[in-house]
Amino acid sequence: MSAANKTSVAEPLVPGHQSIVTPGQSKSARIFTAWLRDYGGIPVKVARSFAANSEDQRDLRQQMYLQIWRSAASFSERAKASTWIYRVCLNTAMTWRRSEKRRQLSLHRST
């Protein structure tokens, strides 16, 4: 695929779903979409490592995508984008795991 084709049309993150970015959107939205297109496998792999079932994996990936979006302004290019995205995903997954353990403990205590 040529560079012109890569930037002219944003590919959907999930097959069968429309792109989240439309022409005329902000530079931040275009960068975010490019990151997810180029490094979208990172959240998938990290979620598989931390969550046992597909529903939890999907929820965790959504949290990762949201955290990448929220943290994008703090990306300072001291690291490669892939490394930065991996760290955001890993930190999000570790926070998710801690909250899941607390939730499970709370559910166990209430029964």
Image (spheres, rainbow, N blue to C red):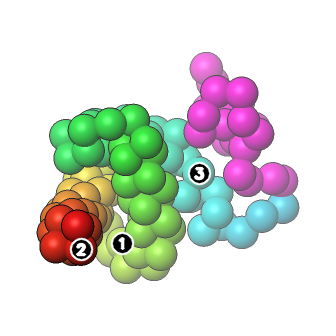
Distance between the alpha carbons at the discs numbered 1 and 2:
42 Å
Give the secondary structure at mark 1.
Answer: loop
- Residue 33: mark in rendering: 3
Work out whether residue 99 can be spotted. no
Q: In this orientation, which residue lies closer to the viewer: 110 or 77? A: 110
Considering only vertical position in the picture, is 89 above or below 50?
below
Is there any visible trace of residue 111 in the rendered image?
yes
Left or right of 27, for residue 54: left
Residue with the mark numbered 1: 75
Marks 1 and 3, how far apart at CA: 15 Å
* Mark earlier in primary sequence (2, 3): 3
Q: Are marks 2 and 3 in contact (CB under 8 Å)?
A: no
Q: Residue at x 32, y 36 (%)?
A: 53
Most extreme residue toward the front, as rendered? Answer: 111
Question: Which contiguous range is marked in magenta?
Answer: 1-23
Q: Is residue 21 magenta?
A: yes
